[in-house]
Amino acid sequence: MTDHTENDNKGVYVFNYINDYFGHPCAVFDQLNIAVCWICKNKVSGMLTRYPMNVSIYDWAIANHFFVPKRPDQFQPEFIGRFTSAYLEHYHFEFDDDGNITYGEDVINEHCWSYPHHAPSDCPNHTDYLKKKMRNE
């Protein structure tokens, strides 16, 4: 098996919006600060997960010794296709009906400096990132 631990420094943050019925991915970011600012600005509840690039979660978990398949069904496509791992870097966010953060405030305070008075231009992380993207840095 290929060693996928070299991919640990490459990854994307995927935000899965969660409502009463299901969760689905709705945003992808290459930086944690940008993701947290977007979550804060839009007051969306859900989970932000960092996924490694160019490797399945199944192979990543095995390569990093987080999972060892033992049963025959754990080698089957259906198992591999549904596999996920709590060892992935992830953050939970919950906002109440009034837009107040009820879970995840510590992550927002650490990564989004302008919370709770947030406008897109207020976030230094977001504006610096956009400026660099416009200059193709």
Image: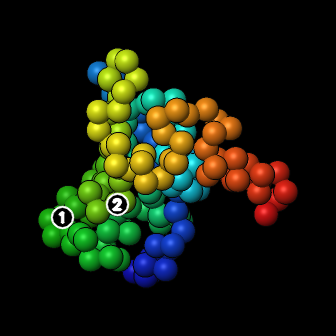
How far is disc 2 from disc 1 in space, using C-alphas? 24 Å
Residue 48 at x, y percent in the picture: 41, 46
Q: What residue type is labelled 1?
A: Pro
Query: Can you give x and y, in whole percent of width and height, for residue 56 in the image?
Result: 43, 62
Q: In this view, does 131 lie above or below 102?
A: below
Residue lying farthest left? 71
| Residue shown at the point (47%, 64%) measured from the top left | 52
Q: Judge the density around disc 2: few (<14), some (14-19), many (≥20) Cα neighbours within 10 Å.
A: some
> Relative to the observer, which residue lies in front, 27 or 102?
102
Residue 110 figure quarter:
bottom left
Where is residue 107? Give x, y as percent: 38, 50
**In the image shown, does 60 or 70 lie closer to the viewer?**
60
The answer to whether marks 2 and 1 mark residues whose Cβ atoms lie closer than 8 Å is: no
Give the residue at x 70% y 47%. Answer: 127
Say which quarter of the image contains residue 87: bottom left
Quadrant for the C terminus in the image: bottom right
Reading the image, the residue beneath label 1 is 72
The reply, left or right, for residue 43 in relation to residue 33 is left
Q: What element carries label 1?
A: helix
Image color mode:
rainbow
User: Residue 35: in sight, yes or no?
Assistant: no
- Residue 98, quarter of picture: top left
Q: Residue 88 carries which label?
A: 2
Camera-side residue of 3 and 47: 47
Identified by mark 2, the residue type is Leu
